[in-house]
Amino acid sequence: MRHAIATAGLTIGLCALVLQFGMTVAAGPTLGAAAAQFFGSFNNLASILTVLIFAADIFARSRWLRGFRQPWVYATMAAAGTLTIGIYLLVLAPQWQAHGGQLVADITLHLVLPPLLIVWSVGFNRSGTLTYAELPLMLAPSVLFVIYTMGRGLMFGQYPYAFADIPMLGPAQVTINMTALLVVQTVLNAFAVTIDKSILASKIQHDPERSPDR
């Protein structure tokens, strides 16, 4: 089942990303502008990492993908996927009027791919090795994206999300919005660590010799 989910996630995610990139290129004035818009989306970047995580599981002997097999990596992306689902359902979907291929890509990348990673991570890949000391490392990708988004917006006037649009909302409100998202991401990361640690507690309960006190 684990590899079946990974295979489905890799196939579905890759197809949806190709579809999304193709539509972005078709709508963009230039290839460079389209690429900047595509890679400026948190969900697109998260989806790319998710696909690589699934690929790392399928191609287990690949040394090029071993970094994506680290527990903190897929736990972080599972938490980010949870945030993605929430933002899409509560904020983005009511504002967007997507149709055709764009609707397919939106639903697949926001509501299909993230749950597959969550099920894959929680159901089959809890390592019992994550610690709360890794929370800063797990938050780093989100912090880097915020810095990139704000820098790109200030330089080129392009903001991927309305809640990050400084000219429209003002610096103070955008700061509040982005801080709130980072706080939520931190809470979700901590929850992911707690879930991962629960398997270690279960192992210790059934096998006291595993206890770190021994």
Image (cartoon, helix red, strand yellow):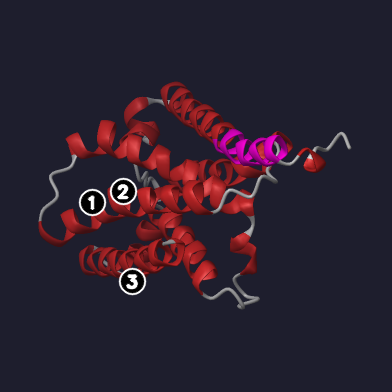
Separation of disc 1 and disc 2 at Cα? 5 Å
Residue under pointer 3: 31
In front of the other: label 1 or label 3? Answer: 1
24 vs 190, left or right, is left
Q: Is residue 80 visible?
A: yes
In front of the other: label 2 or label 3? Answer: 2
Residue 39 on image: x %, y %: 42, 59
Answer yes or no: do the residues labelled 1 and 3 have beta carbons within 8 Å?
no
Residues in magenta, as a range: 192-206
User: What label does residue 107 carry, if any?
Assistant: 1
Q: Tag 3: residue type?
A: Leu
User: What label does residue 110 carry, if any?
Assistant: 2
137 vs 82, left or right, is right
Residue 157 on image: x %, y %: 38, 45
Q: Label 2 neighbourhood size at 10 Å, few (<14), some (14-19), many (20+)? A: many
Separation of disc 1 and disc 3 at Cα? 24 Å
Q: Label 3 neighbourhood size at 10 Å, few (<14), some (14-19), many (20+)? A: few
In front of the other: 111 or 162: 111
